[in-house]
Amino acid sequence: MIILKSQQEIAKMAFAGRIVAEVLEGLKNLVKPGITTLELDEFTEEFLRKKGAKPAFKGYRDYPATICASINNQVVHGIPSDKVVLKNGDIISIDIGAVIDGFYGDAAITLPVGDISTEASRLLKITETALYEGIKMAVAGRRLSDISNAVQACVEGNGYSVVRDFVGHGIGQSLHEEPQIPNFGKAGQGPRLKSGMTLAIEPMVNMGRWEIQILEDNWTAVTKDGSLSAHFEHTVVVTDNAPEILTKL
Ligand code: MF3
Ligand code: CO
């Protein structure tokens, strides 16, 4: 069942989403060569708690941290560590969930560390564009897979591939609600979108092939071919007109 949210509930989600957006803004300034992913995690947890929010991922299926910090060929779910020091030319995907007053926000960005190659920079740009192409389809009356198809068309049209093993999701009083939102598929399928649906849309895009594997820590997903990967995510509300992005300032 896809849970529709009232205006009051959407206001609470907007509050959670705003905190996630704010902390991501702070992280943009912190990400530079020399900082560790554990320091980014600590900054994030402290920020969320100061705002009265709680990390959504910590403890979720025993995930040990506040953020997911995935570098270069890591796709998602990289675990922060004091051993992982960012270096010039890296790309880092940071995924953050927060819960406050019973409602969740979830967003991710991939950032350049110092100066990155033009190829890497194009990957980030296209992945973010693919997210926005998907978001454009989050309008009442359309079908769920219109989002999936728009993301896939943008990604593959630019010569990259879409990760198949992870999906976007409904979000609200749980981090993960129905429906699942694949980043690929034929348009015009799945449930009809309705005003008040709240969705976390999150393309994961590989520069090479789409296949991934999971490392021995049982979390970190990496590209099988070693190619770079990027991840952008927003929590959005479906309306009768333009979708409303909750995790954007
Ligand atoms: N954005 C991802 C998701 O919503 C992050 C989950 S990480 C986990 O599915 F640690 F919570 F699993
Ligand atoms: Co998510």
Image: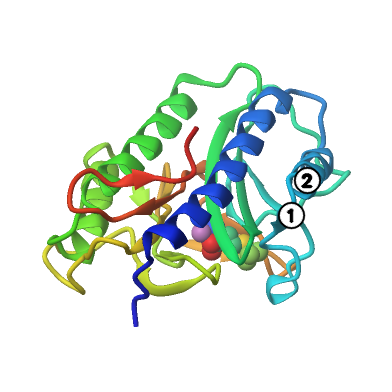
Q: Is mark 1 within 8 Å of ligand 1?
A: no
Q: Residue furthest front?
A: 8
Disc 1 residue type (three-letter) = Thr
Q: Earlier in the sequence, mark 2 or mark 1?
A: 2
Q: Residue at x 49, y 43 (%)?
A: 247
Mark 2 = which residue? 41
Q: Is residue 158 left or right of residue 6?
A: left
Image quadrant in which you'd find residue 163 = bottom left
Give residue 95's position: percent from left, percent from top.
60, 49
Give residue 198's position: percent from left, percent from top.
38, 61
| 2 and 1 marks in contact (CB < 8 Å) | yes
Q: In the rendered image of this protein, does residue 73 appear above or below residue 61?
A: above
Q: Is mark 2 within 8 Å of ligand 1?
A: no
Give residue 13's position: percent from left, percent from top.
50, 55
Q: Is residue 178 left or right of residue 195?
A: right
Regarding residue 177, the answer to whether it shows in the image is yes
Q: Residue at x 21, y 47 (%)?
A: 153
Q: Is residue 70 left or right of residue 164?
A: right
* Secondary structure of the residue carrying numbered label 1: loop
Circle 1 Cα neighbour tier, 10 Å, few/some/many (<14 / 14–19 / ≥20): many
Q: Residue furthest top?
A: 115
Mark 1 = which residue? 66
Q: In the rendered image of this protein, does residue 150 appear above or below residue 126?
A: below
Q: Residue at x 20, y 73 (%)?
A: 190
Q: Residue at x 14, y 60 (%)?
A: 142
Disc 2 residue type (three-letter) = Asp
